[in-house]
Image (tube, rainbow, N blue to C red):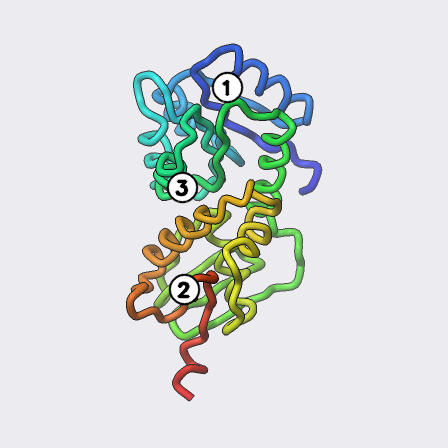
Amino acid sequence: MSSEVRRILLVEDEKAIRDAVAAYLERENYWVTAVGDGQEALDEFEKRSFDLVILDLMLPRVSGERVCRVIRDKSDVPIIMVTAKGEVEDRIVGLELGADDYLVKPFSPRELVARVRALLRRAHIDSDPQREILTFGDLVIDISGHKVTVGGNEVDLTASEFKLLTTLSRYPGRVYSRMELVEKVLGYDFEGYERTIDSHIKNLRAKLGDDPRHPTWLYTVHGIGYRFEDPSKQDK
């Protein structure tokens, strides 16, 4: 599996950037489909499967936000958003749409490749032959099978959401700071951008049906970060 060529969909309307990024990724032995607008991206995604999507927000025909939403409705494929927008709220919007990571132009191709590798590593963690399943009441986390169910219904999580949930759930009651979770979940120092974790937690709570005001599993530790609780232990 480790020698399998990973397929990347690159969506960027600026041809010079698109060509440069595609060339750099291909030198790293990735198989790249490069397109210049949102509609092309959706068409390509319908035609074949991809292991990762690099998605510019500012696109002609169909916006990057719309492309992200459509892809996320169909797939948990890792998505890296790339844009000239650098405002915090723009990043939050992208992450809340379901993106796993965020890069602001101009960026280093080496940094992009590092983030691609980190996301693909998290998304393809099926090489461990030992099955690991965690059960917390209605919540069942099949770590080796990369599957989560609540009340018997499967929940579609992105790679980052799944990594965040497994990181927290392996040690119920342990408090993690936002910075710790950034490093453990994203695999590197995400420029200290700790609000990334808040967005992923918000998405995770919504998908699990965990009310932040009366949580079952995911608790906010104000001024610090988050912790996971096993509801069966709390009743004792």
Residue receiving disc 2? 222
Q: Looking at the picture, does residue 205 appear above or below residue 74? A: below
**Residue 108 % position (x, y):** 61, 25
Nearest to the observer: residue 103 or residue 37: 103
Nearest to the observer: residue 9 or residue 82: 82
Nearest to the observer: residue 210 or residue 140: 210
State which quarter of the image contains the N terminus.
top right
Q: Residues within 10 Å of mark 3 (few under 14, many from 20)?
A: many
Identify the mark nearer the N-term, 1 or 3: 1
Q: Secondary structure at mark 3?
A: helix
Q: Is residue 160 left or right of residue 198?
A: right
What is the three-letter code of the residue carrying label 2?
His
Q: Secondary structure at mark 2?
A: loop
Residue receiving disc 1? 34
Residue shown at the point (62%, 31%) measured from the top left: 111
Q: Nearer the viewer, mark 3 or mark 2?
A: 2
Identify the mark nearer the N-term, 3 or 2: 3
**Residue 196 % position (x, y):** 45, 46
Q: Secondary structure at mark 1?
A: strand
Q: Which dot marks residue 95?
A: 3
Mark 1 near mark 2, Cβ–Cβ under 8 Å?
no
Residue shown at the point (42%, 88%) measured from the top left: 236
